[in-house]
Image (cartoon, helix red, strand yellow):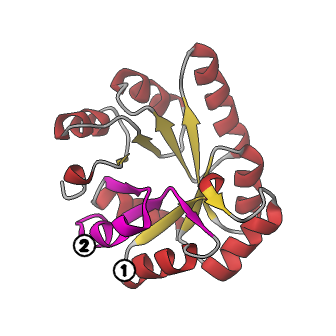
Amino acid sequence: MIRDIIESIRENPVIPAVRREEDIQEAVLSEALTIFILNGDIFNISKMVDSIKESGKNVFIHIDFLEGLGRDDRAIDYIAEKVKPTGIISTRSSSIKYAKKIGVFTIQRFFLIDSHSYETTVKTIHTIGPDIVEIMPAVMPAVISRICQEISVPVIAGGMIQTKEEIIEILKSGSIAASTGKKSLWNL
């Protein structure tokens, strides 16, 4: 299953990062095979996930941005058992560790702001072992390339992407995909 999800992401490496419920349909109609939901609540998350899954696409929920649920293991249990996305995204190592323990596909998001955050990121990846990591901001191809060489986990780069050329550079740097909220890039 993990290998199939990663291959699907590689097959179409532009991932719509959806922040508004009304943008789900546009993401579903795009060429993308994977969609990230970066906002939602307990009242609309199942509907959004179901809509994406019905289209045959992978859907990942950024659980740190999900309103109305706690930030504990029971919230992850609820998402896994009732909402049933392809997987989750989180910046929190404890959430990623627990989700992996119960068999949920995980993407851990890291923000690289300096050399200390870079070193901490590499150590955390080796310790926690998420299925995929997302590095932000994406517009640092040299840093993305360096981190891809230091870890064995597939990398997605996201954040601040504005052009097709930036996506090409991100993919050349070793990232398997680029996540973006910029709708004009969703059909590349």
In the image, 130: left or right of 36? right
The residue shown at (40%, 85%) is 54
Q: Which residues are magenta?
A: 14-41
Name the amino acid, label 1.
Gly
- Helix or strand or loop: what does disc 2 sit on? helix
Q: Which mark is residue 34?
A: none
Residue 68 occupies quadrant: bottom right
Compare marks 2 and 1 and give the one earlier in the sequence: 2
Indicate yes or no whether the magenta region holds residue 185. no
Q: Residues within 10 Å of mark 2 (few under 14, many from 20)?
A: few
Residue 126 occupies quadrant: top right
Of 126 and 135, the residue lying toward us: 135
Residue, disc 1: 56
| Coordinates of residue 116 in the picture (x, y in percent) | 64, 16
In the image, 89: left or right of 99? left
Of 125 and 42, the residue lying toward us: 42
Residue, disc 2: 29
